[in-house]
Structures are given as structure tokens and as C-alpha cells.
Image (cartoon, rainbow, N blue to C red):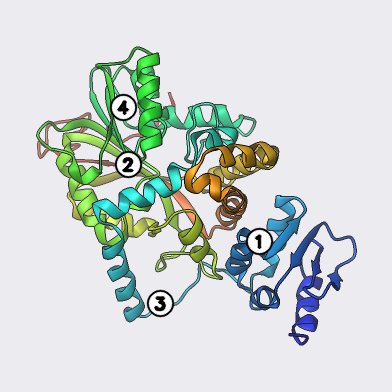
Amino acid sequence: MQSLIPKIESQLASLPVPIALELPDGRRVAKPGFRVTLAFSEWSALAKLAAHQVGAIGEAYVEGRVQIEGAMRDLIDATVGMLPGNPAETNTTWWTRLLRLAKSHNSHSLHKDAEQIQFHYDVSDDFYALWLDPRRVYSCAYFRTPELTLAAAQEAKLDHICRKLMLQPGERFLDIGSGWGGLLLWAAEHYGVDATGITLSKNQHAHVQRLIEEKGLQGRVRVELRDYRELSADAPFDKISSVGMFEHVGAANMPTYFRKIHSLLKPGGLVLNHGITSGQLDYRQLGAGMGDFIEKYIFPGGELLHVTHVLRETAAAGLEMVDTESLRPHYARTLWAWSDALEAQLGTAREVLARAGGRQGENAERILRAYRLYLAGSAMSFEQGWISLHQMLSTKPDGRVEHGVLRGSQSVYPFARDYIYK
């Protein structure tokens, strides 16, 4: 292990942010003016650092084998320098792709998807409330102007989606993966729709039920604890949204997912899919161990697809993409806002998780450490362009050439963007 030290010293010299390493034998390797310290209790973790396996270092931190001192933003800046190249660039063989598809098939049954969603979203409502905006919108905000606060940018995002969907009073609106109800309630209160949301999170379901009752929206807004595959197409919806959802669907189930949306949408209606996409054409997770870290601690079963893959499946299901917008840097800023908010109240977050009981209470420190790295590391990944975020608006053509603002529209979509911004 002693041979690692010269290599690591060379790595430290080239980092954009000076850091120090405390070795298992008590020695310190440091760059002058260091702002971050990594303290290792095991040589094996140090070997992972030398091999540029930053995901394994993250795992060692979560499990207590590495300690971190310093600002999270400084740590992330240093992490970029630790990587040998773009972790999104992975060469995959046909055999690798086949294995991934098989894994995807096995990871997304009704039972497994419910377990995986609850693993992430049912950590603790109070924990999420510490660093999300007051509406608990857990997806990319829309900074319509740079000076917006996170709360204002989240409201701008909700309205951006409603405008894109051209929501009208009395329309039947479905939100697939409705979270803590931000979009569902915004659409009902500001656009007068009859709104239905579905979620697999028991905590989120209970929270939205309470909000519906508090706001007196019973009868016009409802939320169901239900998988999208269980929805009946007997009464199709005028408009559908899916925000932060298709990342959980899995590549193998994408055809099923979009066919279900097609069956649930009225002819001529609109659907908006908003979700994280990969930065490269052919990979399912980030390299350097980062994807493995997220799979283990944050989003089990999560899979990222390139936007072209998503749009291909959209078209294969009979939906016509009419507008696609990238919000990649918006998500970087959103994640940094979440990260900064969490970092500002780590003590409170630790206490909240400890009080949650069950898995959360027993693993409070591990969960907190995992989320610290997840939020800041994801912000870095969006900034670097390793992953992206797209809103994809599609129609279900009704086959009536004469229908629409322009002949051949075959839907309510006006085939002009002005309506979104007025």
C-alpha cells in the first residue's frame, strides 16, 4: 500500500481545490492551503481513490470508513479533478446491453417497483421538508429569470407544465407519479381541472390526502396509491403529465409505459413527460462507481435513457412529439439549492431521521451521508453534462385532418410556442 502514496500525491497536485488526506497509519498527505480533508481508516478505501473509483469512496464515507471535513461544494469541485475523464462515456458490447435489459426486466415488477419507490420516497417526510421548497416539489425547478428563489422557480415550473399542456377548467387531468402533490394541486387551484394523481409512496399518498381535505378540494382532486400499469383506460384523460417518473420505469418497460399512456389519453390530447435523461447515447448509469452508489443508496432500480431512446419509445406507442425542451442547468441549480439547504441544517436532519424509526432511525447517519453526496454529486453531473433533463410534450393524433388551429394538427396543440409564454 505504501506504493500508492506517490501516485496519490501526484493526483492531489492537479486538483482544482486543495485537499488533505489522513492515512490509516496517522500520516497526512496534503496540498498547501487545503480546504477539504478525507480521513481514511482502511487502506482499501485509499486504493479505490488511487483507481479513481469515486463511487466507492462515497460508499466508504456512508459506511463510516472515510470521514469528510469541509464544504460540500469544495469537495465536489475536487471530485471533478479526481476523475480520469467523462464518466458518462462508456463503451458497451451487445452482451452488456443484453444483460442490462435482462436486469431491467427483473427489476420492475409491480411488487419490486413499489418497494423501490418506498425505499427512496418514504425515508421521512420531515427530512425532505427540511431542504425542499414549501410545496415539496421534488423535481427540476424552472428559473425563468436568474434571480428567482427556489420556491418561486418551482412555482414557475408547475405553471410552465400547465401552460404547455394547455389545461382548461373542467378537463380531466392525470399526474403519473404525483409526489407530494405540487403539480396536482397547482393544476386544480390555478387551472380548474378535475385532477387525479397516482403514487407508490405511502407517505406521499397520506400527505396529499391531507392537503386535499385542508384545501376543500374533495371531489375535484384525488390521489391513489396505484401503479400506472393498474390504471383503467375506460375513461381517458384530456391531459396527462409525468414528472420525475420514467426514470423509475426501466428500459424493458418503456414500451409498456408509453402504450399505457396512449390508452389513457383522449384522441387529440396532450401528455408531458419530464425526466432525467442520460448524457450519452448508450449507457444506463454513470461510471467511476457513481451509478453503483446511486443504485445502492438512493434509487434502486433507476435507469437513465438518452432522450432519443425515450422519444423513439414515445413514437412507437403512437404518440407524436411536438415539443422537447432541455432544462439541464436548471436542475444543477435546483440540486445545489437542495444541497445548500441540507448542509445548513445537518444537525436537525440527523435528529429528524433518528426520530423516524424503523430503517430510517437505525440508519440515520448513513442515510444523511448518502443524501449529502447524492444531492451535491448530482448537481455536479448536471453541470458537467453527464446527465440531462428534458420535458417532452406529445399528442395523441385523433386522425381528423380538419381538427386543430392548423389543418392537419389532429390535436389541440397549436404548433406554435407563443401560447406557453403569454
Which quadrant holds the N terminus?
Answer: bottom right
Which amino acid type is shown beneath numbered disc 4?
Met
Which mark is in front, 3 or 2? Answer: 2
Inter-mark Cα distance, 3 to 2: 33 Å
Q: Mark 1 points at which residue?
A: 64
In the picture of the structure, the residue carrying the numbered disc 3 is: 92
Name the element at disc 4: loop
Q: On screen, 252 above or below 9?
A: above
The amino acid beneath tag 1 is Gly
Observer able to see residue 296: yes
Which of the 4 quarters of the picture holds residue 401?
top left
| Residue 40 spot, x, y in % from top left | 73, 68
Look at 48% across and 48% down and name the residue there.
359
Helix, strand or loop at label 3? It is loop
Q: Closer to the N terminus: mark 4 or mark 1?
A: 1
Q: In this view, does 125 lie above or below 221?
A: below
Judged left or right of residue 347, residue 305 is: left
What residue would you read off at disc 2? Answer: 200
Marks 1 and 3, the one that precedes in the sequence: 1
Give SS at disc 1: loop
Q: How many residues crowd around disc 1 within 10 Å: few (fewer than 14), some, or many (20 or more)? A: some
**Contact (Cβ within 8 Å) of mark 2 with mark 1:** no
Tag 3: residue type? Thr
Local secondary structure at mark 2 = loop
Choose the circle earlier in sequence order: 4 or 2. Answer: 4
Residue 296: horizontal and vertical position, in percent?
A: 48, 61
Q: In this image, 354 relative to 255: left or right?
A: right
Q: Residue 166: give its label.
A: 4
